[in-house]
Amino acid sequence: MLKRISALILAGATALTMAGCGSGDGSGGSSGGGADDGKIVMGFAQVGAESGWRTANTKDIQEAAKAAGVELKFSDAQQKQENQIKAIRSFIQQKVDVIAFSPVVESGWDTVLKEAQNAKIPVILTDRAVDSKDTSLYKTFLGSDFVEEGRKAGQWLVEQYKDSSEDVNIVQLEGTTGSAPANDRKAGFQEVISADPKFKIIASQTGDFTRAKGKEVMEAFLKSNPDIDVLYAHNDDMGLGAIEAIEGAGKVPGKDIKIITVDAVRDGMQALADGKINFIVECSPLLGAQLMDLAKKVVAGEQVPQRVVTEETTFTQEQAKEALPNRKY
Amino acid sequence: MNRILKHRLFWPVVVLVALLLLNLVFTDGFFRIQMREGHLYGSLIDIFRFGAPLILVATGMTLVIATSGIDLSVGSVVAIAGALACMQISDLSDQNSVSGVLTAVGVALALSVVLGLWNGFLVAGIGIQPIIATLILMVAGRGLAQLITDGQITTVNSAPYKLIGGGYWLTLPFGIIIVAVVLALTAFLTRRLALGLLIESVGGNAEASRLAGISARGVLMTVYAFCALCAGIAGLMISSNVSSADGNNAGLWIELDAILAVVIGGTPLSGGRFSLSGTVLGALIIQTLTTTIYSIGVPPETTLLFKALVVTIVCLIQSPAFRAKVFHRRRRPIEARPATEEKVRVSA
């Protein structure tokens, strides 16, 4: 009796979680093996719905598939690698034409990718990479270049302070320690600003990509370093948290402390338009159209480059005011 | 002197003072408290302000642990309460309406209590082990929070809501005032009335208490509901502090920090007795440690190691058995204390 009840509860709980994340589950379902009518069938294994960025990414891929006439079989892994591997295996069994996925983690993909290769189904990686030595296991990797994003942030800073000879004190809010975006955005930024010794990173700490941590860490920075000129945050959310901390300390974000962030989600763009952030480097989740394009080429047997970088831009305060009304995420 | 040394809160206090001294040496102006924009401003105030949610969650956790239970679901309740309140406020036509915010807060706290009663029902009504019973809500609750916010970070722009976790009243952060009220109430209920005794007796031996005429089931339900209520208030504070609800990250791993705070404060995981002041001290130690890491600039790659080292030292120094071994002196026969101090992890 006891076991039965707890099993029921567990089942209910799982159903609830699935309902929370599986907004896109409805698109699959029709018969597999579908190249007969000339329509490309794509199996897409998404990471999950862990952030607004990811939700926008999912939505864009679904819309782009519809627009490109690609039949999309969508699966949500809820941030678990085993779910993603299961989804890819089921795509292989359904004999889809092409498989695309954003790997939850970097390692552990060789076996399942080999299975796809044996079934002669091409694989495209989106947004995140895998660390497989054998690059023939996937056709191409479509995603942002995080190092380049860091460089863009650094270049804007160098440009802003090119006429000044005084020291520029920078504090940095890093992403989750060890994650690829955190490592690369830090490295790219460092690379550009290290050319000039007047740029000094006086404090750098992880804010875990969240607003709450961003605020907490910035509060501590403000107290232990009275003279901060610039804040560089690895994503908008940490920057938004830090803005609150700066305002709480009686300083004006965007003026007393210049702020650079990465991502360009809606709340961040709003703050940029309001003058609280000075510069945002875009890290776009809208890679659907590029993905469909690549998928068609791959299925047609055309050669594609091993690495395709997402089309991305940067925003100043004026550009943000213009872009804001049309922002999708 | 000997009496002070033997006081059970002596060692936690020593650790807290040591951490503060570390800051005195390494951080300029750590102890400076100034008035800025009409409220108190300084690192020490920050420790209380950011520690407030943890103190609340740990207070609820103390009572649950005193009944020899545990509540892993507090982090999820934190996320759900914040998400529900923010969603309702963002639907208001006027986000600054006090009555609208109060309704949202009321509904969020009511749901928290319901979730707590659910935990209590699983533990006391059906008899599932607490760690399993609350694990269900811990896992499913995050999904529920995401369902409420639709997987997005919901931002609100509401002055009355902002007050709860980010505002000030009488120059003090409002969160500290809430914590003080909740603590005073809890202390009154458990130490002036019989509730504390009942909790300890259920924790010591539930069956014996039942035979002695205590409604063990009622006590357990009350305690789990109270724990969830504390978590709910903490959730409102956390989301109000940044004016947004993040179903994914709000309160992530706070259950582990709360359990750690309880253990550092000298409440054994086996239940049967508890110390509220110890828990507050434990929570303050954890928050001071976090703030110290930021202020003295421990590199992010080594923060977890640094935290682990300090926590290990705190736990070892807290253990009478360890002290007796190291100091080669047995002041008194060591009580057969369960090795609660080992099962501890720190979150990032």
Image (cartoon, grey):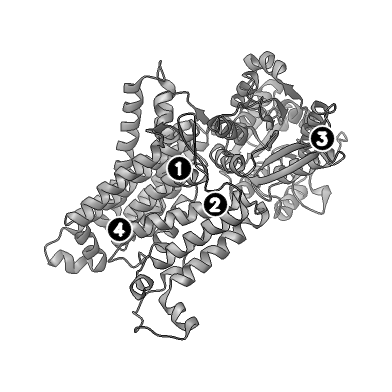
Q: Is residue B202 above or below residue B101?
A: below
Task: Kindly state the secondary structure of the residue where label 3 is placed.
Answer: strand
Q: Is residue B306 visible?
A: yes
Density class for disc 2 (Cα within 10 Å; few <14, some 14-19, many ≥20) is many
Density class for disc 3 (Cα within 10 Å; few <14, some 14-19, many ≥20) is some
Q: Which residue is mark 3?
A: A308
Q: Which residue is mark 1?
A: B49
Task: Kindly state the secondary structure of the residue where label 1 is placed.
Answer: helix
Residue B199: x and y in percent read 23, 59
Number of the front mark, 1 or 3: 1
Q: Disc 3 vs disc 4: Cβ atoms closer than 8 Å?
A: no
Q: Considering depth in this image, is B117 or B158 the residue closer to the camera? A: B158
Question: What is the CA distance from the residue labelled 1 to the residue labelled 2?
Answer: 13 Å
- Residue type (three-letter) at the residue carrying disc 3: Val
Q: Which residue is mark 4?
A: A2
In percent of the image, x 63 and y 14: which residue is there? A325
Question: What is the CA distance from the residue labelled 4 to the residue labelled 1?
Answer: 43 Å
Number of the front mark, 2 or 3: 2
In percent of the image, x 31 and y 27: which residue is there? B103
